[in-house]
Image (cartoon, coloured by chain):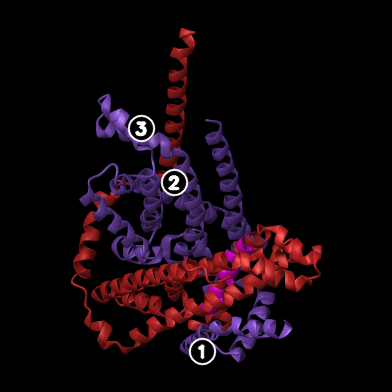
Chain colours: A purple, B red
């Protein structure tokens, strides 16, 4: 009995050998392409830790200067989310099979998929090339970035709606616009709000990154402090960013909880 | 009775109008504060038209002529792969240390959870800037950044997945004398493996996109080539690179979809 058990347990893992070898080969190749070695990792980690120690006491006097850029970042993320949500509702309506005709739907779905595969930062680089530096390309980049995610999620939500509702509205003489305003939008509202809040969290993080490329705000302050070798100031900016991200995360979590409760009550 | 029927819709309508106008006022104040004019997109559209005129037709020759681009694609893919692999491994280890049903010591759990949430809130920009200083600009800095962000994004999720596993199988084999490690191996791992693999494939997808963005801050790879091309105003090359990136991202997405279906669909992980 015991012998057969042993034989079995050896056989059992045999089929994992080939994938494991493949994984090791790919890992080794990738490590060579990246120039990643353990020696480099060791020196890098030591350097990083000593650098963190060097950054450590944050420059509290710069804290007041950071508040306004942080607020700007939040406003950029907010406006990007608002306009992005409006845009993605339009795209979602066009991309839903039960509202628009098949040709429009397929073209819109393709556009949404295309947008989703372009990172926001590339959109921002192009917009900066078009409009110059400033908050405007940042807001537009965030708004366009919403389409890929929110547009797809909302279009799927609309397609899952109960067709009976739309048919009954149609049968009493509602036109397409009335069906959308009184039938579709109220039903997707809870989903819309929770997706939008989730996207707002993502946009807050993105606005920090986009700020460093040239959209202004606290991301720019951070990048600038690093560039000017004012590491204590950079640490202050880091703290402000962490507070900002943590705060919006808690806020959106709370609001989403409340929305869910309201939806359940109805 | 009739007053109730009449007043209810109008009250609802009033509330709707109040919320809507308040939102409108807040948005317009924010617009004025940032100096952002939504209509300006249409009045200043000629800038976009000029840029598009510069960008088309894409100069695909650069993909063949510039030999560093082929290698930079490999670098970006390797960055995403290694970042996912090592980040995933560390995230799994930390998740086991942070989960209630695998780690009996409270102090270890609390410390791990605190570390995970700290890593989660540190923005990717700060991590890459620090690593660029620590190991120098290049793919290695981008790789380390991806490891950190993967831990931040997936560590807590993995811990929650481990805590949500079914307890009865673990209790059953524990009661017939299995050690704590045997409980993990024969009860918890079979339950969590499918969702871990699905999440790691998803992480590879995310890391691929992040790797492109990291190139701009000194992470190397295809993002760096793109940034350089925008800097020297070669917009026809930029278009070629962007179309290459789109194809790459879509291919990676399809590949991760295919692998997920192949590995999870057959159910041969048990």
Q: Residues within 10 Å of mark 1 (few under 14, many from 20)?
A: some
Residue A5 percent across, percent down from the top left:
69, 81
**Do badges 2 and 3 share one subunit?**
no
| In this picture, residue A255 sits left or right of residue B47 | right
Label of residue B33 in the image:
2
Label of residue A28 in the image:
1
Residue B170 percent across, percent down from the top left:
73, 63
Q: CA distance from mark 1 to mark 2?
A: 52 Å
Disc 3 secondary structure class: helix
Residue in the foreground of this view, choosing between A259 and A250: A259
The quadrant in which the N terminus of chain A is found is bottom right
Q: CA distance from mark 1 to mark 3?
A: 57 Å
Disc 2 secondary structure class: helix
Residue in the foreground of this view, choosing between A71 and B127: B127
Residue under pointer 3: A165
Q: Are marks 1 and 3 in contact (CB under 8 Å)?
A: no
**Do badges 1 and 2 share one subunit?**
no
The segment highlighted magenta reads B143-158
Instruction: Please identify, in this view, whether the residue under mark 2 or under mark 3 is nearer the observer.
Output: 3
């Amino acid at each position: 009995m015991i012998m057969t058990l042993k034989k079995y347990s050896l056989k059992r893992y045999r089929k994992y050998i080939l994938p494991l070898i493949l994984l090791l080969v790919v890992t080794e190749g990738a490590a060579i392409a990246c120039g990643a070695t353990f020696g480099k990792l060791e020196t890098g980690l030591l350097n990083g830790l000593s650098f963190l120690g060097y950054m450590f006491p944050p420059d509290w006097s710069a804290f007041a200067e950071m508040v306004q850029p942080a607020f700007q970042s939040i406003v950029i993320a907010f406006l990007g989310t608002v306009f992005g949500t409006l845009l993605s509702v339009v795209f979602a309506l066009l991309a839903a099979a039960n509202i628009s005709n098949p040709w429009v739907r397929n073209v819109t779905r393709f556009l949404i998929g295309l947008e989703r595969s372009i990172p926001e930062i590339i959109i921002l680089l192009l917009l900066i090339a078009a409009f110059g530096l400033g908050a405007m390309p940042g807001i537009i980049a965030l708004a366009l970035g919403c389409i890929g995610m929110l547009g797809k999620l909302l279009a799927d939500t609309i397609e899952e709606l109960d067709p009976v509702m739309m048919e009954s509205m149609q049968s009493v003489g509602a036109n397409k616009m009335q069906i959308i305003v009184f039938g579709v939008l109220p039903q997707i509202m809870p989903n819309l709000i929770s997706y939008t809040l989730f996207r707002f969290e993502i946009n807050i993080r993105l606005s920090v990154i986009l700020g460093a490329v040239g959209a202004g705000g606290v991301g720019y302050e951070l990048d600038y402090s690093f560039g000017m070798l004012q590491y204590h100031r950079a640490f202050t900016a880091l703290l402000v960013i962490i507070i900002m991200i943590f705060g919006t995360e808690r806020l959106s979590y709370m609001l989403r909880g409340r929305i869910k409760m309201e939806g359940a009550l109805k | 009775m009739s007053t109730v029927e009449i007043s209810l819709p109008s009250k609802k309508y009033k509330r709707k109008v109040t919320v809507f106008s308040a939102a409108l006022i807040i948005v317009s104040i924010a617009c004025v504060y940032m100096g952002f004019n939504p209509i300006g997109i249409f009045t200043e559209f000629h800038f976009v038209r000029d840029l598009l005129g510069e960008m088309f037709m894409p100069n695909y020759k650069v993909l063949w002529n510039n030999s560093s681009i082929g290698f930079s694609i490999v670098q970006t893919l390797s960055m995403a792969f290694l970042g996912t692999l090592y980040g995933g491994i560390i995230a799994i280890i930390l998740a086991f240390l942070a989960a209630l049903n695998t780690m009996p010591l409270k102090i270890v759990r609390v410390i791990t959870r605190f570390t995970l949430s700290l890593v989660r809130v540190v923005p990717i920009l700060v991590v890459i800037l620090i690593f660029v200083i620590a190991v120098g600009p290049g793919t290695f800095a981008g790789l380390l950044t991806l490891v950190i962000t993967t831990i931040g994004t997936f560590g807590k999720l993995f811990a929650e997945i481990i805590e949500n596993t079914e307890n009865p199988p673990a209790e059953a084999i524990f009661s017939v004398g299995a050690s704590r490690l045997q409980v993990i191996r024969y009860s918890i791992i079979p339950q969590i493996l499918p969702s871990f693999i699905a999440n790691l494939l998803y992480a590879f997808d995310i890391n691929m996109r992040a790797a492109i963005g990291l190139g701009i801050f000194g992470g190397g790879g295809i993002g760096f080539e793109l940034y350089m091309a925008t800097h020297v105003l070669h917009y026809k090359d930029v278009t070629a690179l962007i179309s290459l990136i789109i194809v790459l991202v879509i291919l990676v997405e399809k590949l991760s979809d295919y692998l997920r279906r192949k590995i999870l669909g057959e159910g041969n992980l048990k």
